[in-house]
Image (cartoon, rainbow, N blue to C red):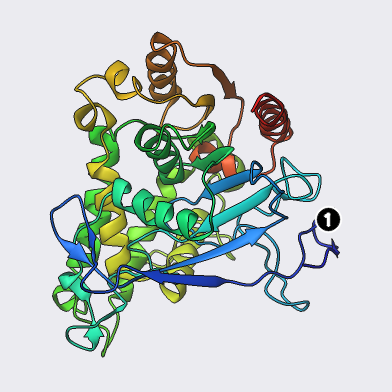
Amino acid sequence: MSEYIDQNRDSVSVGVVKKKVFTFAAPPDEMMLESGAKLGPITIAYETYGKLNADKSNVILVAHALTGDAHVAGYYSEDDTKPGWWDIMVGPGKGIDTDKYFIICSNILGSCMGTTGPSSINPDTGKPYGLKFPVVTIGDMVNVQKALVDHLGIEKILSVIGGSVGGMQVLEWCIRYPDMVVSGIPLATTMRHSALAIAFNEVARQSIVADPNWNNGDYYSGEKPALGLSVARMIGHITYLSDESMRMKFGRRLQDKEVFSFNFDADFQVESYLRHQGAKFVERFDANSFLYITKAADYFDLQQQYGGTSVAAFSKTKAKFLVASFTSDWLYPTYQSKKMVKAMKKNGLDVSFCEIDAEWGHDAFLLPSERLTKLQKGFLERVYNER
């Protein structure tokens, strides 16, 4: 992979990268899901950055959030102007240093970015799965990632890193495969969704289901449920921001006008912004995938799954942890991270915790942060040296 300077960001990039795929679990060896259903074959899309060292001890797995993909860093061509979703953090000399570590990022099960999901072709019918796709869990997503890691011949992961739904995957990895994961960095995440988080997801799902074009999930040969998915994205996007960030970015400023329209056009800048985000999202994401992934996030509950208490949940993991929350994140507020840290410490685990001042809400982990960069870089160096 070549390295070049991204003039827009004035930083070194990993350069041009290529998406890869791995297919496994072909019948009759389908993967057993936590629901009891079987699925196969399964294709997983992934990208890698950096070089694997001789003893394969420098592996970092990056897990993406709800609507992310495997393209965490770099560009798909020399003319590509849009870098990977965490290019500010992954690259030569950056917080996750590709000069030192071998980074893997894969698209999650149930998504629509190259990994098998409801928009994929069902081999039994020759048509997209739609709602015939089985409901999946965060654990199922991690098991698919584990199959990829096994395929790559890797027996030890130095660190699993991710924010939001990616952070759920980090926790699941550390608990499910305690002998394989050396450390975890869960960012802006939770051990289980609050009623508030579930409520927002349900309203978003209902906006999709209520769209007349949704057609009970069978819309692939016709009009997409664009309006429903757009509204779902608008709802989600509000939860990713904060009161302060919206005040600073929009306030009550009007969009391209000086007086109210006295109709239902987008008078305010914030209205125009949300409509734009919704419309843009429809172009790149599948409505059914949104339903499946939000449901998996709602089902995620470490306490229920592993022993009934948060302390019991972390009783078998051996990983070292760096946990970070953000002051303005009201979707997964700091008290949820503190509860996680307390449970880890009660198990005698090596845990570092930091609440980072940020005014941008839940999405703060995706934005430039010198504090987060230094924390991750220092933690990874320590873990690597102590391995």
Residue 247 visible in the snapshot: no
Numbered-mark total: 1
On screen, 211 above or below 138? below
Which image quadrant is residue 121 in? bottom left
Name the residue located 31 percent from the left edge and 69 percent from the top edge. Answer: 117
Residue 75 location in percent, x, y?
Answer: 70, 69
Name the residue located 37 percent from the left edge and 49 percent from the top edge. Answer: 142
On screen, 284 above or below 158? below
Residue 132 location in percent, x, y?
Answer: 15, 72
Query: Which residue position is annotated with label 1?
Result: 12
In the rendered view of the protein, which quadrant contains the N terminus?
A: bottom right
Which image quadrant is residue 383 in? top right
Name which residue type carries label 1.
Val
Q: Nearer the viewer, residue 69 or 242?
A: 69
Look at the numbered disc 1 and give the secondary structure of its residue: strand
Question: Viewed as shown, does residue 362 lie left or right of 262?
Answer: right
Name the residue located 35 percent from the left edge and 70 percent from the top edge. Answer: 116
In this view, the residue farthest toward the front is 55
Q: Nearer the viewer, residue 376 or 176?
A: 176
Question: Viewed as shown, does residue 235 lie left or right of 9?
Answer: left
Which image quadrant is residue 306 in? top left
Q: Nearer the viewer, residue 274 or 9?
A: 9
On screen, 308 above or below 111? above
Residue 17 location in percent, x, y?
Answer: 68, 69
How would you rate the neighbour count of disc 1 (Cα within 10 Å): few for under 14, some for 14-19, many for 20 or more? Answer: some
